[in-house]
Image (cartoon, helix red, strand yellow):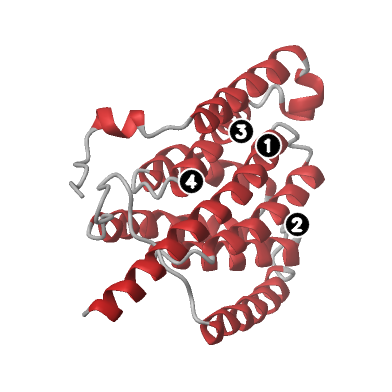
Amino acid sequence: MTKQKPSFKSFIKSFTPYQTIYLAAVLLLTAFFTIFFPDVVLGDYQGVIALVSCAIISTISNPLCELLISKQSKWNFVVDFFLIEIPELVICLHFGWYAVAATVVFFWMPIDVISFIRWNKHPDEEDANLTQVKRLKPWQTALIVVAILVFGFVVGYLLQLIPGASDTYLDAFASAVGMANGILLLLRYSEQWLAWLITTVLYLFMDISSGMYILLITEIAMLINTIYGIVKWYLYTKKRAIQKASEDITA
């Protein structure tokens, strides 16, 4: 089979009707609720221009980034760096979510750059717009779970000692699972979707507790796309496993 070369045109054509409708729905819902229900969506933060702007940008960009991940596209890291991490840093510092803020600066931003470079080295053998992905072994999954629990409890306890810190354990576990998601994503493991599912749920509770209801649009949208991503990556890795087994038999 002839390998499809990467190009902007082929990348745009790769968007399915579901993916196009998904992005359009997020954009329209964000615009609708922001314009017609500002009191409900933005709460007490309507006058804080920087905070509102960051929330709107994040609301639109997060589903786009996650959709690009489900498409196994390396460009998700570019969207994440410029349109998600910077706005999220502003929001985290405002609400005193110091663990998440530190994670953004010292983990997510560097890992976006590293991940983009690594993904660029592993294009799919048939379609260069895709990146090859794989699965963890059971013992690797167990080790990651233990690391998340240890990190969450230790950092959560330390955060309680910082004046002004809020939702300390929730903040710590959101950071821990988020970091696990970032590492798994960098290494192209499909289990990153499970970590992201937990991260999204934790952020959902944090957004509700802080009154940033506009971010609920992006959280709910990402929950929907996470299920889509789990299925899509599973089918891809299953297909790759079958191909590899067939190659081993014929070798």
Residue appearing at x 60%, y 68% in the figure: 176
Secondary structure of residue under mark 1: helix
Find disc 1 in the rendering and name its residue.
215
In whole angstroms, how far apart are the C-alphas of marks 3 and 4?
A: 11 Å
Q: Secondary structure at mark 2?
A: loop
Give me the residue at 69% from left, 16% from top: 32
How far apart are labels 2 and 4 at the CA level? 20 Å
| Vertical relation: 150 (above or below) 70 | below
From the image, tell me which residue sits under label 4: 85
Q: Compared to 183, does 47 lie above or below? A: above
The amino acid at mark 4 is: Glu
Q: Amino acid at mark 2?
A: Ser
Question: Badges 1 and 3: C-beta atoms under 8 Å apart?
Answer: yes
Q: Nearer the viewer, mark 1 or mark 4?
A: 1
User: Residue sitting at 76 percent across and 26 percent down?
Assistant: 41
Up/down of 16 relative to 246, above or below: above
For label 2, the residue is: 166
Circle 3 — which element?
helix
Where is residue 80, by image quadrant?
A: top left
Determine which quarter of the picture holds residue 170. bottom right
Q: Residue at x 70, y 40 (%)?
A: 220
The answer to whether marks 2 and 1 mark residues whose Cβ atoms lie closer than 8 Å is no
Q: Nearer the viewer, mark 3 or mark 2?
A: 3
Residue 93 seen in the current view: no
Q: Position of residue 236 (x, y in %)?
A: 44, 57
Query: Is tag 3's residue or tag 4's residue first in the polypeptide sequence?
Result: 3
User: Horizontal and vertical percent for residue 139?
Assistant: 54, 87
Q: Nearer the viewer, residue 199 or 211?
A: 199
Distance CA(mark 3)–CA(mark 2)? 19 Å
